[in-house]
Amino acid sequence: MKKMKKIVAFLGVAAMSISLLAGCGKKDSGTAVELEGVTLKNPGKLSVGCEVGYPPFEDFAEDGKTPIGYDIDIITEVARRLGLEVNIINTAWDGIFAGIDVNYDVVCSAVTINPERKKEMLFSSSYISNYQAVVLKAGNDKKIDSFKDLDGMTIAVQKETTSDELLSDYKSTGTIDIEIVANEKILSCFTQLDNGEVDAVCVDSTVADGYLAKNPGKYNYAFKDQSEPEYFGIAMGLNNTALQAAITKAIDEMKADGFIDETYDYWFGSGK
């Protein structure tokens, strides 16, 4: 499904910042969230590290340069409610967290909240839940009831993601014998699946939802591990507790007034 350009948020190589309104046309919040004590890289701007190329969370519009997607809408609305401009900085996933407090204030890029990361960064409250999933090429009717059924297969994952960590753990412990092909971009994983270079893609269920909706009849949703939900949040530096409180308050308001549900339905379809 081609997405209309709900947000105009392109920042070129120089990461130029422009003031944006969120794309779902939601009602304004009553008052701006207080920003007392908040530390920002640039006053009046919320600088955001984001790997553009992980649809439907982040992608480029048809013009090839305007970032659009679920995360873009969420962080743009957060910034608006904080009375800030948003500065989207396209950053490779590998090493994205090292840029917090160096190149940008926060990372909003389908980031799973987990105990290991919480030792090194702060998180907002969650704005979406997610599961790990397996996608096959259409016509492959192999029955997969658990990750153990991937035994003997070649699986594409995006490097340094939960999918990569999960399957690497299965392989290193000898639970299953698989070949893992780790790519820099999720787009490469699906290209390899299309070309028959891998048997399956292991990916976030929300991303799988987007690919299947955009390419009906092309892929087979083989498995979703609903036993272990993940939660995505906005990450920031350990010392930026004031910013954490402000962003969490904005997200909680967005949940309460329906903005997050509306945005979810737009990008992923109803049935959250």
Image (cartoon, grey):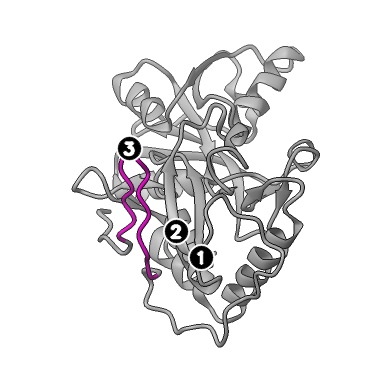
Which quarter of the rendering shows the N terminus?
A: bottom left
Q: Residues within 10 Å of mark 3 (few under 14, many from 20)?
A: few
| Rendering coords of residue 241 (x, y %) | 76, 57
Q: Are marks 1 and 3 in contact (CB under 8 Å)?
A: no
Image height of 189 relative to 22, above or below: above
Q: Earlier in the sequence, mark 1 or mark 3?
A: 3
Q: Looking at the picture, which amino acid does disc 2 mark?
A: Val
Q: Position of residue 235 (x, y in %)?
A: 64, 48
Q: Amino acid at mark 3?
A: Val
Give the residue number, with chain letter if any, for mark 1: 79
Question: In the rendered structure, are the residues bearing label 2 and label 1 in contact, judged by CB atoms less than 8 Å apart?
Answer: yes
Q: Disc 1 to disc 3, how far (Cα)?
A: 21 Å
Residue at image location 59% in from the left, 27% down from the top: 160
Give the quadrant of the C terminus: bottom right
The residue at which mark 2 appears reads as 86
Judge the density around disc 2: few (<14), some (14-19), many (≥20) Cα neighbours within 10 Å: many
Segment tinted magenta in the rendering: 8-21
> Where 164 sits versus 244, above or below?
above
Q: Is residue 228 left or right of residue 10?
A: right
Q: Between residues 5 and 140, which one lies in front from this camera angle?
A: 5
Q: Nearer the viewer, residue 131 or 146?
A: 131
Rendered image quadrant of residue 26: bottom left
Sequence order check, earlier mark of 2 and 1: 1
Residue 2 point in image, percent of width and height: 25, 54
Amino acid type assigned to the residue bearing label 1 in the image: Ala
What residue did someone put label 3 on? Answer: 13
Compared with residue 16, is residue 168 higher up or lower down, i.e. above or below?
A: above
Secondary structure state at the residue bearing disc 1: helix
